[in-house]
Image (cartoon, helix red, strand yellow):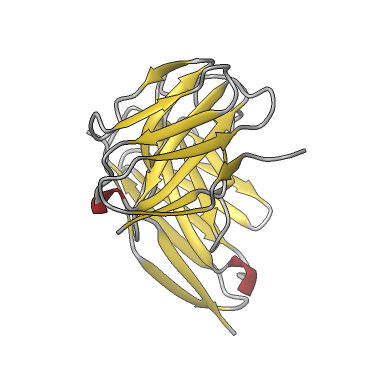
C-alpha cells in the first residue's frame, strides 16, 4: 500500500514568509509525528498527534510553529515569519496506534526540504 | 535529559563486518532502534530491541545492548555496497510517544 507522503518535496522561501508543509499518513494510522532534521544531525521531535488533537507539542521551538490535523488524517505544519535557522528537512511519520513500541513502528515519509533565503 | 551519541563516520571493505556504536544517557529507555537513511529516501526501520534483552539477531543484523553502560551496537555481517547509508540509533522512553535520535553514523562500504 501507499506509504507516508509529504508535499512539497522542496520549498524555497524568503525570510519572513509563511509556509505550509503537508503530510499524508498511511491510511488508518491514528498517530502522526513531525520531526525536523538539520544538516548533519538526527531528526528532532516537534509534535505528536493522536487523532485530531496534538497530544505532545513539546518539541515545537517557538510560537511561530503550529500544526493541525483537523480530520485525523492529513496534517499541515505551519511556520510563520520564517527565519534562516528554520532551514531543514521536515519529516512526518505515522503509526498504527498511539504509543511508541517495538511492534508499533513509525513509518517515515521522504521529508520536505525547506530552505529559507 | 535525553542525549544519544554516535561516531560520525565508519568505512569498511565489502564483505567485512561493520559495527556501529551508540551511547545513550536515559536509563528509562524502553525500546532502542536502528534506522537507515539513504539519500533522498525516508528513514527505514532496520531493527529494534526491548530494554530487557541484551541481544537480538535478524539475518545479517545483530543488535547488542549493554544496559549497565547504556551502550547499543549494530553489527552488519558481510557488508555490501548497498549498505552504504547513514545509520541512526533512537530510543523511546517508557510510556513515550516520540523517538529521540542520535547524530547518525555514515557508513561507507568500499570495494
Residue A33 location in percent, x, y?
A: 47, 31
Left or right: A103 as drawn, with respect to B7: right
The quarter of the picture where the N terminus of chain A appears is top right
Considering depth in this image, is A97 or A24 the residue closer to the camera? Answer: A24
What is the count of numbered marks?
0
Residue positioned 68% across, 22% down in the render = A28
The quarter of the picture where the C terminus of chain A appears is bottom left
Specify the farthest residue to the bottom: B111
Residue B42 location in percent, x, y?
A: 56, 51
Residue A39 appears in which quarter of the rendering?
Answer: bottom left
Residue positioned 41% across, 18% down in the render = A54
Question: Do we see residue B38 in this rendering?
Answer: yes
Question: Do we see residue A106 in this rendering?
Answer: no
Residue B7 location in percent, x, y?
A: 33, 62
Residue A9 location in percent, x, y?
A: 54, 52
- Does residue A117 lie above or below B32 as drawn? below
Residue positioned 26% across, 40% down in the render = A81
Amino acid at each position: 500500500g501507499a506509504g507516508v507522503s509529504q508535499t512539497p518535496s522542496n520549498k524555497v522561501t524568503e525570510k519572513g514568509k509563511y509556509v505550509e508543509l503537508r503530510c499524508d499518513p498511511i491510511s488508518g494510522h491514528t498517530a502522526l509525528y513531525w520531526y525536523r532534521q538539520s544538516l548533519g544531525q538526527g531528526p528532532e521531535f516537534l509534535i505528536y498527534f493522536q487523532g485530531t488533537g496534538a497530544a505532545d507539542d513539546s518539541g515545537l521551538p517557538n510560537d511561530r510553529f503550529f500544526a493541525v490535523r483537523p480530520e485525523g488524517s492529513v496534517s499541515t505544519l505551519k511556520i510563520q515569519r520564517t527565519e534562516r535557522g528554520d532551514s531543514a528537512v521536515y519529516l512526518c511519520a505515522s503509526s498504527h496506534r498511539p504509543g511508541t513500541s517495538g511492534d508499533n513502528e513509525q513509518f517515515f515519509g521522504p521529508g520536505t526540504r525547506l530552505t529559507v533565503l | 535529559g535525553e542525549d544519544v551519541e554516535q561516531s560520525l563516520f565508519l568505512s569498511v571493505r565489502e564483505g567485512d563486518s561493520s559495527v556501529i556504536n551508540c551511547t545513550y544517557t536515559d536509563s528509562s529507555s524502553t525500546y532502542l532502534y536502528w534506522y537507515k537513511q539513504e539519500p533522498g529516501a525516508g528513514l527505514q526501520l532496520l531493527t529494534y530491541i526491548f530494554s530487557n534483552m541484551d541481544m537480538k539477531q535478524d539475518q545479517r543484523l545483530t543488535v547488542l545492548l549493554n544496559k549497565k553502560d547504556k551502550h547499543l551496537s549494530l553489527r552488519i555481517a558481510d557488508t555490501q555496497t548497498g549498505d552504504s547509508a547513514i545509520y541512526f540509533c533512537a530510543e523511546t522512553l517508557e510510556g513515550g510517544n516520540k523517538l529521540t535520535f542520535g547524530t547518525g553514523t555514515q557508513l561507507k562500504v568500499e570495494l
